[in-house]
Amino acid sequence: MDAIFLQILNGLDKGGAYALIALGLTLVFGTLGVVNFAHGAIFMMGAFCAVTLEKILTLSVRVKDESVTFFDAYKETPYLEVWFGDTGSAIINWSVPLSILLAIPVMLLIGIVMERSLIRYFYKRPHADQILVTFGLAIVMQELIKAFFGANPIPQGAPDIVAGSAAIGAVFGLGESVVYPWWRLIYLAFSLMTIGLVFSFLHFTTYGMVVRAGMADRETVELLGINIERRFTIVFGMAAVVAGLAGVMYTPVLPPDYHLGMDFLVLSFVVVVVGGMGSLPGAVLAGFLLGILQSFSSMTEVKDIFPGIDQVIIYLVAVVILLTRPRGLMGRRGVMES
């Protein structure tokens, strides 16, 4: 029972990342009709916002080491610690959560610039053209990151206060031996909160309602005198922010490298297709569902029976669902069924 409970938590944690990326992909496809293969690179760029801020906060100066009395010795000490002491140390320790403040404007700007300078020219082009140009853009973005930060993963630590594990077994009556990393629980809560904010924006604000109306019938909304194209540009920026924040908060779980976006991109597209192209609830449902299935398939007992099943389970599920329901779990009738 303990193992099953932990695997469910692992699946929800991983599914949260899938759902956030797939949510952004679905927003872009639903509003603009664009298949954006650069979305995984946006997730990666968000992760490197955290890396960048951590590097800025840890800029150091050589300070004399007073603990060495026999000769003059120096040690590298961050400027923040020199200037602010323990407060500076605390700021450095909380660099990952603070990166959200950097990532929001940076990712919004990246999304808007991408849409205005490139993506808008491919709205009416075939999906194959969209895939090629956005995939090429993703390669350019990851090579830029590789040039600036190198090819090796760069570990990012969670704040000390949440760096350990929570005794969740005691809360659910499973015994005190059942523990789970605090940061993964925080990431799950963050994923659910972000998803809730996106849905609340789309369903309970006038701006979001107009966007949803434009997704359903763009021509009619434009005839009402609304500049739906400008709103869709903002939505593209929002999708980039959602993916970027997912990347920022995932850095303590998986050290980011230049290939991080590609690793998540393919899986996230599978999530979108399984959930239903253009269906936001479907993307979220499929993200968590496939995350849980992947988690259970990685158990030793399962792999002993079906070796390598954890590597292909998502694709097997996708094949089964698309053969029986081509529009996906919650896709609109007629989408992907012709």
Image: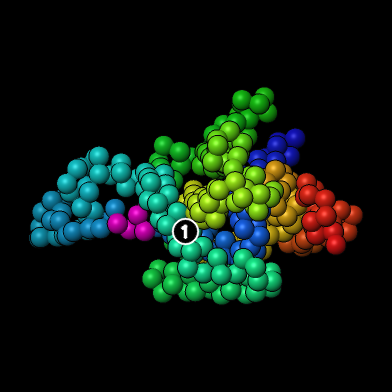
Magenta extent: 52-56
Residue identifier under label 1: 112
Q: Compare residues 235 and 79 and report the one nearer the observer.
A: 235
- Magenta segment's dominant SS is helix
- Quadrant placement of the N terminus: top right
Q: Residue at x 29, y 57 (%)?
A: 56
In the image: residue 180, left or right of residue 320: left
- Tell me: residue 54, above or below residue 144: above
Image spot of residue 5 (x, y percent): 70, 37
- Tell me: residue 257, above or below residue 136: above
Q: Residue at x 86, y 53 (%)?
A: 325
In the image: residue 23, left or right of residue 290: left
Q: Residue at x 45, y 54 (%)?
A: 108
Quarter-of-image position of residue 50: bottom left
Image spot of residue 338 (x, y percent): 85, 62
Q: Compare residues 64 and 251 and report the one nearer the observer.
A: 251
**Residue type at numbered disc 1:** Ile
